[in-house]
Amino acid sequence: MTQIAITRTAHPKQTPPDDSLAFGKVFTDHMFLMNYDAGKGWHAPRIEPYGPFTLDPACCVLHYGQGIFDGLKAFRGADGQIRLFRVADHAKRLNRSAHYLCIPELDPAMVEESIRALVEVDQRWVPSKPGTSLYIRPTVIATETFLGVHPSHSYLYYLIIGPVGAYYKEGMNPVRILASDTYVRAVKGGLGAAKTMANYAASLYGAEEAQKAGYTQVLWLDAVEHRYLDEVGTMNIMLKIGDEIVTPPLNGAILAGITRDSVLTLLRAWGYRVSERPVAIDEVLAAAKAGTLEMWGTGTAAVISPVGELGYKGERYVINGGRTGALTQKLYDTIVGIQYGTTPDPYGWATTL
Ligand code: COI
């Protein structure tokens, strides 16, 4: 593997107090960069002081959105050890996203190495208060300067990291989500399964409308019939209906969440009946009315997020009395326990730095 060149900052910043942390507002002293050029492949891996970089105004990503990213976290346990959660799986997913966007494959070992090297250099930034972590954002952008539409011949892979607290202002308290019968996030055969900027851009207008109506997020329904649950955009969605756990299948329109996979693995090991199947909104509303529904979202940023209220076509449906369900809490405690090294990790998901 090519040696990573490291240039350390001459002006290290002060780290923020752990109890002041929000999500995605603070970044560390350094960033990782690596270039791709046709004929040369990926080259020049380096760590440099964090800061703005220059892009030509005609560069491809600024016009046609040829870019991808991923998101993972590092945790500082009570034992002082820093653990990365499922880093190899995130590196693989970045490559799957690259494939959808015609971006040349990155060596997953190099991606993992870049993450480990940057977290190592900025390890004093990993917070330790329960509920905080270091968020890691690998990103690839198309940098060729041209205004014709075809895949770029040059790219920049960069990695930025920063200490974070809870993603939602509600923290671990239940969120309210609005199932949209008007707007759509992604369509099968499109980019919905890729972690690409376009999916987040597509979610903004609907999310603004939902927030005006008092909801935290949108629950996106399928783009054709507006009937089946897809995902929330910031997280995958899961339900316990009676004694069945249900989540929408990876149908090409939703992201293959790594927390989603972790939760499904745990639930199956605990003996639950787990179905990855289409879930119609009518089925969810009927279960909410009957009081047989527990609902939560899963995501790297969102962790396990209970859903306390669902809006649909002007009606509000309270779920599980608006409280965090027992299974949701157990999943949260188990995932977070594995991440901080306080719960056994039979699958080897958390690896130390
Ligand atoms: C993540 O969970 O890592 C994401 O990328 C979601 C984003 C909305 C913060």
Image (cartoon, rainbow, N blue to C red):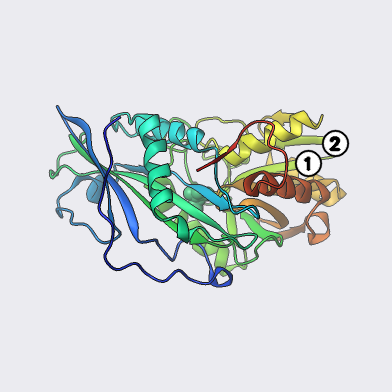
Observer-nearest of 45 and 289: 45
* Residue shown at 67% from the left, 30% from the top: 276
User: Relative to residue 200, is residue 221 drawn left or right?
Assistant: right
Query: In the rendered structure, are the residues bearing label 2 and label 1 in contact, judged by CB atoms less than 8 Å apart?
Result: yes
Answer left or right for 65 relative to 321. Answer: left
Q: Quadrant of residue 44?
A: top left
The residue under the point 63% across, 59% down is: 131
20 shown above or below 111 = below
As measured in the structure, the alpha-carbon distance from the residue carrying label 2 to the one carrying label 1 is: 7 Å
Residue 69 visible to the viewer? no
Amino acid identity at mark 2: Asp
10 Å neighbourhood of mark 1: few (<14), some, or many (≥20)?
A: many
Q: Which residue is mark 2?
A: 243
Residue 329: percent from the left, percent from the top?
Answer: 77, 51
Task: Specify the quadrant that holds the N terminus.
Answer: top left
Q: Nearer the viewer, residue 267 or 178?
A: 267
In the picture of the structure, the residue carrying the numbered disc 1 is 240
- Determine whether the residue tagged by mark 2 lies in a helix, strand or loop: loop
Where residue 202 sits: x, y (%)? 43, 50
Of 273 and 287, nearer the camera is 273
Q: Does residue 299 lie above or below 225 as drawn?
A: below
Locate residue 87, reporting x and y percent. Answer: 50, 38
How would you rate the neighbour count of disc 2 (Cα within 10 Å): few for under 14, some for 14-19, many for 20 or more? few
